[in-house]
Amino acid sequence: MSTGAETRYADCLTGTWLAERLAVDPLEIDAMRRAGELVAVREPGSDEWRYPAWQFDRWKPRRGIPRVVAAAREAGLDETGLYDLMTTPLGLTGGAVRLADLLAEGREDEVVAAVRRG
């Protein structure tokens, strides 16, 4: 039986897998996370970072990610809060548009402004 903890970050990649895909050392992936160049989250009770796939375009981090992470840090959002904000559908219309989708469309300024508002 599956629990919410097992599926919550189903759209995320492990650091090891990502490092292999990008052909870099896993320590470099972790350094990018610490520097605010990548978004990462952890499953409850886990010490393994997982990296949301929506922050990549053709296996390169989207250019707005550092600004989004910086805005989240300024707003006092932790990694989980940022992930939740980026993946929660916007508005009351029942649409499935998320901040992650706006970022993919190149609407970086709108995403950063929304993250700053928390």
Image: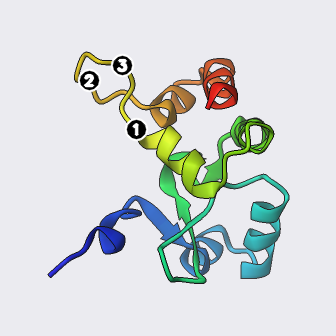
The answer, for residue 58, to whether it is visible in the render is no
Residue at 81 percent across and 64 percent down: it is: 34
Image height of 39 relative to 22, above or below: above
- Which residue is most to the front? 76
Q: Could you tell me how far apart the alpha carbons at marks 3 and 1 are, in whole angstroms? A: 10 Å
Nearest the viewer among 38 and 42 is 42
Percent across and percent down for residue 63 are: 72, 37
Residue at 35 percent across and 72 percent down: it is: 5
Kind of residue at disc 3: Gly
Q: Are the residues tagged 3 and 1 within 8 Å (C-beta)?
A: no
- Which residue is most to the left? 1
In the image: residue 48, left or right of residue 95: right
Other-residue count near label 1 (Cα within 10 Å), few / some / many at <14 / 14–19 / ≥20: few
Other-residue count near label 2 (Cα within 10 Å), few / some / many at <14 / 14–19 / ≥20: few
Q: Could you tell me how far apart the alpha carbons at marks 2 and 3 are, in whole angstroms? A: 7 Å
Q: Secondary structure at mark 1?
A: loop
Percent across and percent down for residue 16 are: 60, 81
Q: Secondary structure at mark 2?
A: loop
Q: Quadrant location of residue 70?
A: top right
Nearest the viewer among 70 and 44 is 44
Other-residue count near label 3 (Cα within 10 Å), few / some / many at <14 / 14–19 / ≥20: few
| Front position among marks 2 and 3 | 3
Say which residue label 1 marks.
88
Image height of 56 relative to 42, above or below: above
The answer, for residue 94, to whether it is visible in the render is yes
Q: Could you tell me how far apart the alpha carbons at marks 2 and 1 are, in whole angstroms? A: 10 Å
Which of the image's four quarters has the C terminus? top right
Say which residue label 3 marks.
91
